[in-house]
Amino acid sequence: MRACKALIRHCRFYPIDSVLSLGVIALIIWVLWASISWIVQAADWSVVSSHLPLFASGSYPLDQRWRPLLWISLLAALTLITLIVPIKRGSNRWMGMVLPWCWVFMIPLGLVLMAGGLGLTPVPSRAWGGISLTLLLTVCSAVLALPFGILLALGRTSDLPVLRHSSRLYIDVMRAVPLIAVLFFGKLLIPLFLPMQLEINQVLRAVVAFALFAAAYVAEDVRGGLQAIPETQREAAAVLGLSPLQSLQLVVLPQALRIAIPALTNQAIGLLQNTSLMALLGLVELLGIAQNLLANPAFIGRHLEVYVWLGALYWLFCTAMALLARKIEHSGPTLNGRSA
Amino acid sequence: MTTAIKADHICKTYGAEHRALDDVCVDVISGEVLVVMGPSGSGKSTLIRTFNGLEEIDSGELDVLGIKLDNEADPRHVQRIRRRVGMVFQQFNLFPHLSILENITLAPMRVQKQTRVQAEAKARSLLEQMGISEQADKYPAQLSGGQQQRVAIARALALNPEIMLFDEPTSALDPERVKEVLDAMRTLANQGMTMVVVTHELGFAREVADRVLFMDSGRVIESADAKTFFNQAQQERTRKFLNQIN
């Protein structure tokens, strides 16, 4: 009721505003209506629905398809559990301890499931594809980029000139080069330098290139966090007899990383979307599958359906990542009186 | 009577001109409470920060618990000294990402390699002593300033230090919170702890200090036992300062 009155008063005093607002609202409703009616009526989703396993796992051997599917399902389940279970420290310690380890375990598990070994039939990396490849690329490069980025950030803020300047040089060069150039470099040039018999796995090459690239950005995010920690925190650690390394590990980094979480989430989301560049280099990840499908004459005119579906998938993954990050951020205590 | 800290003609310069410590000589005897007073910028904080190696001295000789702390001191020696000298800061400097209990047990577990059980038992008894045992599982941001400062004292005491340094421990507190921190310090003094306290709290100095040191512009102007200092200060500068803050 009160909101209504306030609205009416607002309209009386700002008539032009009100007309504009009404126009915009009408436009939004029209666009929404048109989109929904297209999604429900006009669109032919058979191109998507008949290829769901293809989107999930690409050209993975049919009899082994359960492996990427299992990994995706486990990831989805773990994401849901992490989002639902409250992990305020102190109240639910057990979950707070187990969940991070589950996440860490997902990476080797994914690699083994995809590549084979340990009793599973080996599947070469050129047969990997779809969502499972997209997620694997993202997760592995993120996991490599984080420690490397932290080391770079520490080097960048070090007192040793050699370390400081070489870290800065690396960061500046990497940020000056477009990602696609780094990827081409990884794909085309690195094999030239290596002896013929040593053929590096293509997925591995992509992961390393992504990680090297992302590390430069991660380093700057972490540096922001490091600079937000007042010098007095290091002093307080020092007067307790902690060594500089212990002070970094126990006092400075835990706080700096917490502060850097929003920026690091940005990087992780960017990384996920950047994996689509690999389609240009012949890896059949999510975008690659879509392009292969659309190259089939049977699906001429079905571009919109496929790309809307892709958009929805990327949106889902990015939202899940953002929610997970928020969860991590809120699971710790408030720093410096500010709400975290 | 053994000497805990012996500073002999120590000097410290910041930049080209500013002499933070100018030829300072101080002895702190085991078990005594030395209060350092002086206007801001007089070098009193710098002085006590040299006592645990947070500031390096440029010249002179400084001996803390039998270990030399000069500009050639081995960083590992400095680290070892810091385990035996506790320090409490003006801004508490608790670790905001750790609970109160974790703040206190961090150094005993990581530096002295105590077990968690051992360290937590000690921490809880210290919190009890400070009158804040019910705060153990909270985080620093949830505590008042006075409570945080008492946690900081407990954190320093957890390493069983032989000397405690206090750098204006009550200056950042609301007036009504000052007393609880001073009471904790008074208890500590009564237990025979060697203490060096930088403070403007005249009442505390009068009542607890064995000796008072007055500094201005990096120099020691006057050093006397508390009674003489407050009743018959020798130096004009000291009397002026006391008049102003009274």
Image (cartoon, rainbow, N blue to C red):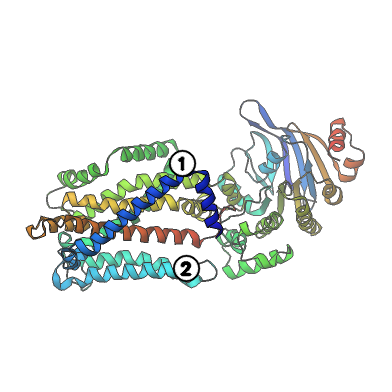
Indicate left or right for A305 with B237 as reference: left
Amino acid type assigned to the residue bearing label 1 in the image: Ser
Quarter holding residue B8: top right
Residue in the picture at 75% in, 37% down:
B25
Q: Is residue B222 above or below residue B111?
A: above
Quarter placement of the C terminus of chain B: top right
Q: Nearer the viewer, residue A17 or B62?
A: A17
**Chain identity of mark 1:** A
Q: Is residue B78 above or below residue A298?
A: above
Residue in the picture at 52% in, 66% down:
A88
Residue in the picture at 54% in, 71% down:
A91
**Chain identity of mark 2:** A
Instruction: Point out the residue furthest to the right here.
Output: B232
Mark 1 burial class by Cα count in 10 Å: few <14, some 14-19, many 20+: some
Residue B160 visible in the snapshot: no
Q: Nearer the viewer, residue A298 or B38?
A: A298
Quarter holding residue A117: bottom left
Q: Nearer the viewer, residue A3 or B39?
A: A3
What is the x, y in percent for residue A308? 24, 57
Amino acid type assigned to the residue bearing label 2 in the image: Gly
**Labels 2, 1: front one:** 2
Secondary structure of residue under mark 1: loop
Task: Evaluate if marks 2 and 1 touch, with contact meaning CB atoms under 8 Å apart.
Answer: no
Q: Disc number at residue A158?
A: 1
Instruction: Point out the residue furthest to the top here.
Output: B17
Indicate left or right for B161 with A305 as reference: right
Q: Is residue A49 above or below residue A152?
A: below
Q: Disc number at residue A96?
A: 2
Indicate left or right for B182 with B62 as reference: right
What is the x, y in percent for residue A327? 45, 62
Residue A251 visible in the snapshot: yes
